[in-house]
Amino acid sequence: MEKALQKAKSYILEQEGTVVTDYKPYLHFSARIGWINDPNGFCFDGENYHLFYQYYPYDSKWGPMHWGHASSKDLLSWTHLPVALAPSEPYDQSGIFSGTAILDKNKMSLYYTGHVDVNGVVEQCQCLATSFDKIKFTKHDKNPLITKQSMPEDSVFEDFRDPKILIRKGRYLMLTGSRTKEHLGQILIHSSTDGLSFKYENRMVFPRKYGDVVECPDLLTIDGQDVLIFSTQKAELNEHVQNSFSVFAWIGSFDDRSFVFNKQNEQVLDYGFDFYAPETSFNGHTHSLIAWMNSWERDQITDLLKHGWAGSMSIPRTLSLKSNVLHQALPQSLDENLKRTSYHEKLWIHQNEMLEYSLQKISLIKFNIDLSDEMLFKLEVFKTGDESFDIIFDGKKSCVTIDRSKAKYKIKSKLNENQITRKMMIGRKLECAMLVDHSCIELIVNGFSMSSLYYGSIDQSKLCLSSTNQIQVMNFSISD
Ligand code: FRU
């Protein structure tokens, strides 16, 4: 593997100066050069967060996957570290696919999927690489640890990936995403006492509406409640599930004896356009979630523009459970990193009036509103000329709609998906936070998120507020 890592290192050093940074986010993680997708091995070692990620340094398109690596103390400023894993062995020759990390004192273990594609014949297996300095990783002699032999017979052997490794009740559990021959998504569960020899225990097979394959499963416990998070391809679309590549969260309890998840509640994890394959980590106090802020089968604007990079992560969000519902919040460290430049305890917007603020490329906007029945309250973000990213709060329909149809560069999907609007049902009393960072816009309303990419002109732009009826916006602040 050493040769492949050296090659990546030299390429990144030599070529990163060629990257065009117009749309490159600053607070959202992106690679120095090249393509990224899923976050991998997201963990906290007591001092630093580690973020690995699906990485192809050599192009702004997906290619044979490596694991890139970065670390951070505050989840906002990241130090790029050497590429951690590259394809090198017969069992991972076509790519190092997604997985997770586990820490035991000084030892960091990365469980990943070895992807092999020989003339279109695909096989996936689960592998391990370890490190004592968290920089240089060695692939384990016992690889591959789990192969298609330990999948239920009616599984599609090509789809067996994205191990989530966790320790529960004193033993290792591994959850992997997969597919049945009937094209139903499934999560396979293996257990182990030493983290090396795994035994197949059970599986969860999902009804058709969840799509035809599960990817990147995650299982965590918040305040004694278990939360299962999984991403799916080709989910059936409806009013809430608006992306073919969607992410679901189940809240309930996982039975460690029968390996069954008893679901009490379910939710879509993000209502925006661009959010996939999230992963969580726990620092002893707080659960954080980070996702690839993008999706498959879409135009990648920075690739089409030949900017030399593509893909970024969401801001890591803080998770909490309230009455069986998963809430997300922007991390507190954001307030410490940005300076408040505008604040109104009470801001009146009169009927047909428009308030304008100049908007920096990185800004955090917060406010509270009480929506009334007939009211349409609108925010135009990055407004310049005819362009803007619109957010419309609709009192009558009790929803917020985001609309990116007025972007300079419009993202087209190869799937039958609307790429213009996304909608989220809301209540009346709203606490809103919006983080804009170049091409990334994240809106959080009462703990529910909408994540979107937006490519407008890079000139000076504005934030405009208007409403069909008089409205009082409370605790309105802009920080940049
Ligand atoms: C999800 C995914 C994973 C896979 C990886 C490949 O976005 O398809 O299932 O491991 O991306 O890059």
Image (cartoon, rainbow, N blue to C red):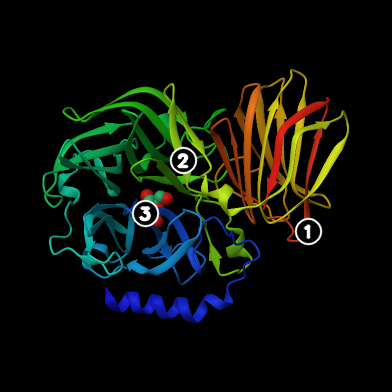
- Label 3 element class: strand
Q: Dot 3 corresponds to which residue?
A: 40
Q: Nearer the viewer, residue 99 or 346?
A: 346
Q: Residue tagged by mark 2?
A: 318
Q: Residue at x 83, y 25 (%)?
A: 470
Kind of residue at disc 2: Thr
Is the CB of mark 1 within 8 Å of ligand 1?
Answer: no
Q: Nearer the viewer, residue 387 or 341?
A: 341
Q: Residues within 10 Å of mark 3 (few under 14, many from 20)?
A: many
The quarter of the picture where residue 473 lies is top right
Q: Residue 340: which numbered mark, if any?
A: none
Whether pointer 1 and pointer 2 mark residues with C-beta atoms closer than 8 Å, the reply is no
Foreground residue, 262 or 235? 262
Q: Earlier in the sequence, mark 3 or mark 2?
A: 3
Q: Of the two numbered discs 3 and 1 on the same chain, state the one appearing first in sequence.
A: 3
x, y (%) of residue 382? 74, 50
Q: CA distance from mark 3 to mark 1?
A: 35 Å
Residue 46: x and y in percent read: 32, 53
Q: CA distance from mark 3 to mark 2?
A: 18 Å
Check disc 1 and report its element: helix, strand or loop: loop
Residue appearing at x 54%, y 32% in the figure: 447
The residue beneath circle 1 is 460
